[in-house]
Image: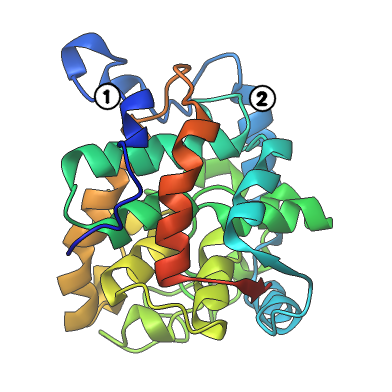
Amino acid sequence: MRLINIGPDPSLAYRPNLDKSKSKDKEDYRNFESGSLFQRVFSTYSLMHKEQTVEFVKKKHAEWTGCSHAQMGMMDAIMSLDQLVDESDPDVDFPNSFHAFQTAEGIRQAHPDKDWFQLVGLIHDVGKIMALWDEPQWAVVGDTFPVGCKFQNSLVFRENTFLENPDDRNTEYNTEYGIYTPNCGLDNVLMSWGHDEYLYRVMKFNECSIPEEGLYMIRFHSFYPWHSHGDYMHLCNDKDKRMLPWVQEFNKFDLYTKTTDLPDVDELKPYYQSLIDKYCPGILRW
């Protein structure tokens, strides 16, 4: 797939260091046991795991998926994340807009022929804009998980943060399959509400032309119990299983490009605006 030629390659201004020998060790990422940000992270997940119920998720679908909150272009939405620091992230403490360009550039380095993949790296967290419109961060950020069935052990802080979630005691919801049937497909599963599902809905509502593989990356990149721990496979159909390697490939860049080496966003914006114009152009409804 040919990329739009806009002159000298602006990505020369920034290439994230993906060499393990010269960067943070992989085992040091997603440390949910200690660290300077631990209390902030734990508090966010505690509220999330208490409040994310079937009833709550259905309410948020009704509130957000009609895309009636704002109208703006994708680049403006990305840059608005200058105002947001993700309270669930134990790895970084800088605005989410930088992470967007770090992820995109990591993907461009490894997959120069897949411009849609690079764009997904740039926009994958834009759903966090909900937090700028007064949605609490526990309903926007962090790992996602199905509601309406048993909460699996691989969920972050599983042992002590779901005790006050009424669905954990509801016999309709707390079994292995809960309200679902074997291999029903993730399309038919209610995920905890957050930026993944919201941005996916925005993409579909605005008829953006990102391929299905990219839409899966957007919708499920925070579903760590599935793509990193192998849980919830009993709910997956053949399509989900085909898409899983794509989500896993995306996760490498979403996670391991997080460094304090921040990109020169102004140098990179023209190239990425060309991809926005190709796949999700104009003013979008949010």
**Point 49% across, 26% down: residue:** 264
Which one is nearer the viewer's eye here, 274 or 68? 274
Q: Looking at the picture, does residue 191 appear above or below residue 196?
A: below
- Total count of labels: 2
* Res 114 seen here: yes
The outermost residue toward the right is: 134
* Res 155 seen here: no
**Tag 2 secondary structure:** helix
Tell me residue 224's x, y (percent): 37, 51
Q: Amino acid at mark 1?
A: Lys
Residue 84 occupies quadrant: top right
Residue 39's label in the rendered image is 2
Residue highlighted by disc 1: 26
**Point 77% across, 70% down: residue:** 70
Q: Amino acid at mark 2?
A: Gln
- What colour scheme does the image use? rainbow
The outermost residue toward the front is: 7
Q: Is residue 105 left or right of residue 233?
A: right
Tell me residue 149's x, y (percent): 47, 74
